[in-house]
Image: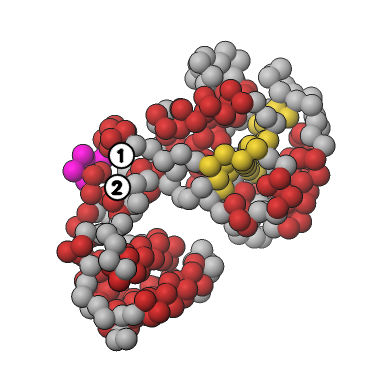
Amino acid sequence: MSVDHTDSLHAPWIARQTTDLLAQGGHAWLLQGPSGLGQYELALALVSAWLCEKPTQNRACGDCPSCHSMAVRTHADLEVLMPETVMIELGWPLSEKAQDEIDKKTRKPSKEIRVDAMRDAVEFSQRTNARGRGKAVLVYPAERMNTITANALLKTLEEPPGDVRFVLATEASHMLLPTIRSRCLAHTMKWPEADESLVWLTGQGVPSAVAQELLRSAGGRPADVLRQTESGLSPDWWAQLPKAMIQGDARHLTDLSPAQAIDALQKLCHDLVLRHSGAEPRFFEKTQLPPSAASVMNLTDWFKRLMQSARTSEHPFNAGLMLEAMTADAQQTLMSKG
């Protein structure tokens, strides 16, 4: 199963927010909030509606030439600013020059939004639009801009051409320059209702019982449930994670990327801290949490180490060794006393 971002545009919580933001106007939006709430999908819905030739009820019609161009990722009035790795993952074409360099293996796809791409976007914003509905620039994940790239965007945000609109989507707004944030209208993503998440997930092919159980492990974020099922993380796998870690079984993490493993271990650590305070766990059932004498201090230190690992999770020297090291660290923490 793969995450269908086109279907995600029609999720009821995305549709509601699209309508609300379109009604407010504004030339630059910053969509912010934790992962799994649909920042990218909402950004895509906004630019689709802005550029649609026959918008209906404040959303793109899906049938006009503009919408067809959007669907095949060739819209002349849309500039997409993403790391090349994300563009490849989401099906957006790279520039001819970038594709040629990557094909010839002179460099790898960038994990940051490149300065060259930002300069292209600035030049794009100054051109005349092709279809008469203005132009749009979509930046995602916006936190992947380095300082030079962000400053190049800032100049355009400060003095935007008359017919261009921007939408920046991020899961880490604190990493953006304060001046970038101040130039945008901020929108914090809304959480979907549990019932509508279940209905939508079953419509995406996730069995109802699986969706209900995984919504807990995903913290109520339906997009994360889809990613979990795509990665083969079944409810049984999730339930066995704490036991596997206390036994030091690194094989349990074999099918995960380092980033996915870190996310899972952070959730386990989070729930163990909650148990210390007498609160209900958020991601696991009480009965799934392992007996552990680890103190809050030890758990907090473990969480900090996981955060440090997250900084290099996208380009580990050896993913297998990294997963083994994280498993050993988890076991040592869970078996610690005091």
Q: Residue at x 46, y 50 (%)?
A: 35
Q: Residue at x 72, y 42 (%)?
A: 183
- In this rendered view, identify the residue nearer to me: 59 or 81: 59
Residue 209 is a magenta residue: yes
Q: How is the image coloured?
A: secondary structure
Q: Amino acid at mark 2?
A: Leu
Residue farthest toward the front in the current orientation of the protein: 278
Q: Are marks 1 and 2 in contact (CB under 8 Å)?
A: yes
At label 2, counting other C-alpha atoms closer than 10 Å, the crowd grade (few under 14, some 14-19, many 20 or more) is many
Q: Which residue is mark 2?
A: 215
At label 1, counting other C-alpha atoms closer than 10 Å, the crowd grade (few under 14, some 14-19, many 20 or more) is some
Q: How many marks are shown on the rendered structure?
A: 2
Distance of mark 1 from mark 2, alpha carbons?
Answer: 8 Å
Work out whether residue 73 can be spotted.
yes
Position in image of residue 288 (x %, y %): 20, 64
Q: Quadrant of the C terminus?
A: bottom left
Work out whether residue 261 can be spotted.
no
**Disc 1 on helix, strand or loop?**
helix
Q: Quadrant of the N terminus?
A: top left
**Disc 2 on helix, strand or loop?**
helix
Position in image of residue 281 (x %, y %): 28, 60
Position in image of residue 22 (x %, y %): 58, 25
Position in image of residue 227 (x %, y %): 37, 49
- In this rendered view, identify the residue nearer to me: 336 or 326: 336
Residue 233 is a magenta residue: no
Residue 194's label in the rendered image is 1
Q: Quadrant of residue 250?
A: bottom left
Left or right, 305 with reference to 250: right
Q: Residue at x 35, y 62 (%)?
A: 267
Q: Amino acid at mark 1?
A: Ala
Residue interval drawn in magenta: 205-210
